[in-house]
Amino acid sequence: YGDHRDLHSFPTRRSSDLKNEIRAQFSLAMSAMYREEVPAYGELMELVADINVSVLERDESLRSQLSQSNGLDRITEERHGAIRVGTEKELFTLRRLFAVMGMEPVSYYDLAIAGIPVHSTAFRPVAEGDLNINPFRVFTSLLRLELIEDADLRAAAQEVLDNREIFTTAALNLIERAEKQGGLSNEDATQFVTEALETFRWHSKANIDQELYGKLHDEHRLIADIVSFHGPHINHLTPRTLDIDGVQVAMPERGINPKAVIEGPPQRDCPILLRQTSFKALEEKVLFKGENGNWDEGSHTARFGEIEQRGIALTPKGRALYDTLLDDTRARVRSGEGAYEDLLVESFKAFPDSYTELRAEGLAFFRYSLSDKGEEIARSVGISGSLDGLLEAGLLRMDPIIYEDFLPVSAAGIFQSNLGPNLGETGADVVYSNPSQQSFEQALGAKVWDELALYADLERASLNACLARLSEKALKDDVAVAA
Ligand code: OOG
Ligand code: NI
């Protein structure tokens, strides 16, 4: 093992620094791999980078807001990926693998309500500083085979899954070493990135024959995607854009064909939560196991492209309003009242669209810092006061806390639009139900973080830090006078 020496060569390194570095390297390696596998992804990355540059050039206040609250540097490197695993054991080990890179499970998403037999979490960094260094996230879904009614098919799928190993031996060893030592040496970290990447690689040779593939596919395309291959290939990698409408319009000019509507809230002055759009899955050549060691040619659609724009995180009250307005929109579309996009815009008129109102009504989370005037006061006389009073006096500035998570309805829309053109035959009519966060957490071997509590903590900590700075001088002077 040689752990002793390894530990000694990095005596001053904080373990979160190393984790951040591994995560950044891993995210880059994933991006390079996906660019090779799916050339349209490279095209999309360039488009997004171009548009982000021009948005920042024309929007000075956005630039200042992002550099204040969210780390401007992180945006070009920012992306999320998505994978789907087949067994509880795979999920359990994935949690350990992501932990080596400082990524922890946040939130629980039940996709069964949308007719998709999986439930999910997202692995991501949790602390603000770590997010700002590199916010790489992986939306991770676990197949719920128990939702398949056909017992024979269920057993056949289970057997295939039980007989595969999605991690390399070296990756498993390095995970264990990181857990024992509380980190990895530089050399181990480099090898870890290479080995971890293998789990997410695309394999064009399936694990099963075409007949079983067909049966799984008829039950649900997603089940075929999860069970048929050697591992949980990354199925999309999503850059963050500062202008999703701009990218949506520019995509066809670069030969990329986006889905018709953008998921999430409509375009607004103050973006909230998350807006996403994707382009269609590739139809890919696949080889299925044939007779006498031969391979049979077939095809499979799994991988696609997606972009997203992130806005302010909402409080439980804001989120409830969002869910209500979205539900209303969908209900009105179903009853034939009009086109989705028009009705969405109309419904969301009920959602205040200035940061002042969002804060006053307790709908969204803010990060507070001292304004220049606040700094001045803190240095000279010091002051104490209420949040409202200090804001009104111009001593504090407030910036949106960016939503770092996902939206189940949007996720379902993304899943659906990429399951292929025959969705109606293969799953949309099946409604799986009963969310089970408890069984998910049991498989994961950990509880998922409550994302709302994370945002609330961040807001509170930022405010407390300001109040402490402002009152420090006043307190000291009091003490001096008393002495
Ligand atoms: C994941 C779909 C969810 C998102 O951005 O909401 C997702 C999948 O298709 O595996 O990635
Ligand atoms: Ni996604």
Image (spheres, rainbow, N blue to C red):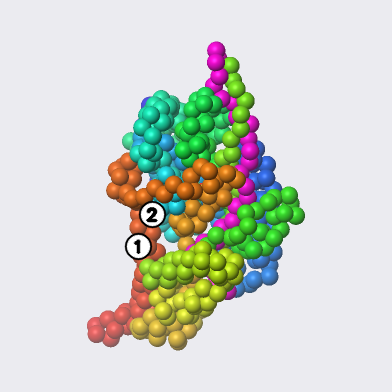
Q: Position of residue 21 (x, y in %)?
A: 49, 45
The image quadrant where one finds the N terminus is top left
Q: Nearer the viewer, residue 121 or 145?
A: 145
Q: Position of residue 446 (x, y in %)?
A: 31, 46
- What residue do we see at 55% from left, 70% from top? 337
Mark drawn on residue 453: 1
Mark drawn on residue 415: none
Look at the picture and state if 452 lies above or below 28: below
Q: Does the residue tagged 2 have its C-beta within 8 Å of any atom of ligand 1?
A: no
Mark 2 burial class by Cα count in 10 Å: few <14, some 14-19, many 20+:
some
Q: Does the residue tagged 1 have its C-beta within 8 Å of any atom of ligand 1?
A: no
Look at the picture and state if 463 lies above or below 101: below
Residue picked out by circle 2: 107
Residue 270 on the magenta segment: yes
- Is residue 236 something that shows in the picture? no
Judged left or right of residue 31, residue 385 is left
Q: Nearer the viewer, residue 219 or 139?
A: 219
Kindly check if marks 2 and 1 are in contact, taking CB atoms under 8 A apart as contact: no
The image quadrant where one finds the C terminus is bottom left
Q: Position of residue 125 (x, y in %)?
A: 43, 52
**Residue type for callout 1:** Ala
Q: Which residues are magenta?
A: 269-293
Q: Which type of secondary structure does the marked residue at label 2 adopt?
A: strand
- Is residue 302 something that shows in the picture? yes
Q: Nearer the viewer, residue 400 or 432?
A: 432
Q: Position of residue 363 (x, y in %)?
A: 42, 73
